[in-house]
Amino acid sequence: MTILTRRSVLRNSLAVAAAGTIARPFIANAAAKTATVWWTQGFVPEEDAAFKRIVEEYQKASGNTIDFSLIPFAPLMQKIVSAITGGDVPDLISHDINDQVLVPQNAWDDKIVEVSDVIDTQKDKYHPTVYLGTQYYNSVTKKRGGYLIPFKTAILPFHVWTPLVEKAGFKLSDAPKTWDAFWDFFKPMQPKLRETMRNVYAMGLQCTTTGPADGNNMFHHFLIANGGNDIVTKDGKAHLDDPKVKEAVIKSLTYITKAYKDGYVPSGALSWNDADDNNAFHSKLFVMDLDGTISTEVAIKDKDERSQVATLGQGNKNDGTPMTPELGIGGAFIPKGAKAIDVAKEFMTYMIKPDVSNGFLKEGLGRWLPTMPSIVKSDPFWTNGDPQVKAYAAAGMLSDTVANYPVFNPGWAEVNATQVWGAAEADIIRNGATPEAAADAALKKIETILAKYPIVQS
Amino acid sequence: MASASVIDVGRHLVGRRSLFSNLRGGLQGSEYAWAIAFCIPYVAVFIAFVVYPVLYGLWLGHKPSLYVELLHDPIYQDTIVNTVLYLVIGVNVKMFFALLLSGFFMRKGWWTKGLLMIYVLPWAIPALPTFISIHWMLNTQWGLINNILWDTFHMDGPGWLDTSRWLALGSVIVSYIWKNMPFWTVILLAGRMAIPQELYEAAEVDGATGIRRFLHVSFPLLANLYLVCTLLSTIFTLGDFNTATFISGGGPALSTHVLATLGIRDAFEIARPELGVAAVLSALPLMIPLVMLLMHKLRTSEVQL
């Protein structure tokens, strides 16, 4: 039996400490094979199952470990902001509005890793708007670079309850194609439906100050339809004094707020969050709305009921030319301070492979679209299957689209976050401001925000 | 002269030794080292979970420009008004009715006890489901209240949370009172039960009954407790996030935010944590005097009958 003495304890302790010091690099290397990943929880369980399957397949193929957390949309946003502020970050972060909020501002602040080497593995296959939407401006390096690794996209289709249209005595096939006229088509349905139904409205316009995304997205599409898409151009310059842009802002504010004040929109829309309009649609509070992805449709589990929803593309602008919807890009980024950057990059290189990402999106019921037109063209799932998916995919991947404004100027992420348009709409609706005055105030506010983000032109 | 100096030095040494001994709590030799060793985990926990977060928060919100930005923000200006109304009306109405109801619940009888049990339910049930239930009850289109109005009078009820700031803020304040009044009623009830019965009997002999008994016996004896409870409740309410978030969500059009909810909005929705922390820290000029007054009142032990 060994007798412990003070000297032997000291000697052995020193030996353990020395061994630990020498072995440390190897332990660190071993740790680098595990990447911590924060991922948005899916809207339907199938999306989570698809992600878990891909992680499993990657782990089997690579020998690396993906230590992932699936976190709901709102808490994940809080967790990410806290982590980046505090400096204790995971290796990879995917949030559904990375492209509109997190990546623009953190790329600007040089807080995320440039990942062009990952993005470029599929560069030639990406939809041009998708590739454009990966490039953000860094105020430290004073140039644009690839910061968002895209694996899914979305546009805002129209969602219409066809039984309500028919009950009101109308046919959806008679709907006009131009923007304002299309919305107007649903207004006469409201009094007809109210003959037998209490509390039913024509449209679910999200004239909200709550956000985070729906109110801004809806307004931007009105802006595009009224010819105001050049409010920010690709060089990051804002054109707030451009008469054409200002006119588009006024027209958009006028249409939205008049529809609300005329009673065609549920009064609670002023404070809707991104889930409230979906819930209101499901309870048949209104006939139609314009909302991102087809989450509205896939959340309806009853097949017969789901088939009663018509999913439509966006038709034409008010000048008769085809609408160019904003293409939202779902992707992941690597925050600076991440310990396993190589594993995170390798995992995303695997994730964005056409067959892998397509499998992931199909298993998630097609709520999100692929990033590559070739996938949509070659896979019947997107072109010959579910009519809702077919219309959605055609509008998103096989038509002209535009990038979100924060891609061009990161200041627009703050414009979106502060809900400038929702505040202008509320000012007209609640305080009786004129659309002209509200537009002036909104544009001035935007000017103040964007002044904090000077972009050097190369 | 020399002998006097020696005595002075000796006195000085004895004085230092006793001071040192006092600092050591009378512990000798290794006892002192053990005492420090046992304290270290608690000090470490205190530093990690109290000192560090407070200092980090102060550091995040230390830039004066943040406060200038807040002061120019109309939403912040509305929020300050809302917070003051929420505190002044919410806390005082709640405490006043809690005081009255605590007198009611002093009545003897099994039914009073049964009623008390039902009365404390809103406080006992978690905040989230109760506030969400109220939020749904107030829904303009399909909420319980407007449905009852429709079924009974065939009239459309108001948009409780939809368009009017004051209706929405009123709904937040009423919900807050409903949720928290039972707790403070029970606290004041306990205070009333601690008043010796003999005092009431003596007052009755002197001819004090009813309201005079309350004014001359109950109220003076409860005054300090009432004030302490009001101060505590004000401090709690200043940091209350749940009520405004789950009843009105800060709407309509961001008009019913209070400081606690605006801080979260600025920190996480606008993704500017430093601005959110500054919004919350701007309550310090109110919070610090409240805490000092509370500490002062906690030392008060005399009661003037």
Image: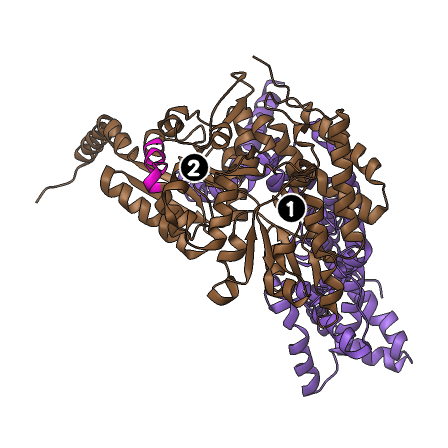
Chain colours: A brown, B purple
Quarter of the figure with residue B63: top right
Q: Amino acid at mark 2?
A: Pro
Residue that label 1 marks = A177
Residue at 80%, 63% in the rendered image? B93
Residue at 70%, 39% in the rendered image? A318
Do tags 1 and 2 sit on the same chain? yes
Of residues B208 and A318, the one drawn nearer to the viewer in this rendering = A318
Position of residue B276 relative to residue A49, above or below, is: above
Residue that label 2 marks = A373
Question: Residue A217: where, in percent of width, then height?
Answer: 62, 42
Q: Is residue A447 visible?
A: yes
Q: Which residues are magenta?
A: A345-356
Q: Is residue A445 left or right of residue A56?
A: right
The reply to whether the magenta stretch includes residue A352 is yes
Residue at 75%, 75% in the rendered image? B148
Q: Given the image, what chain letter belongs to the residue carrying mark 2? A: A
Q: Circle 1 — which element?
A: loop
Quarter of the figure with residue A441: top right
Which quadrant of the figure contains the N terminus of chain A? top left
Which secondary structure dominates the residues rendered in magenta? helix
Position of residue B55 relative to residue A274, above or below, is: above
Question: Residue A408: where, in percent of width, then height?
Answer: 58, 26
Q: Is residue A58 left or right of residue B58?
A: left
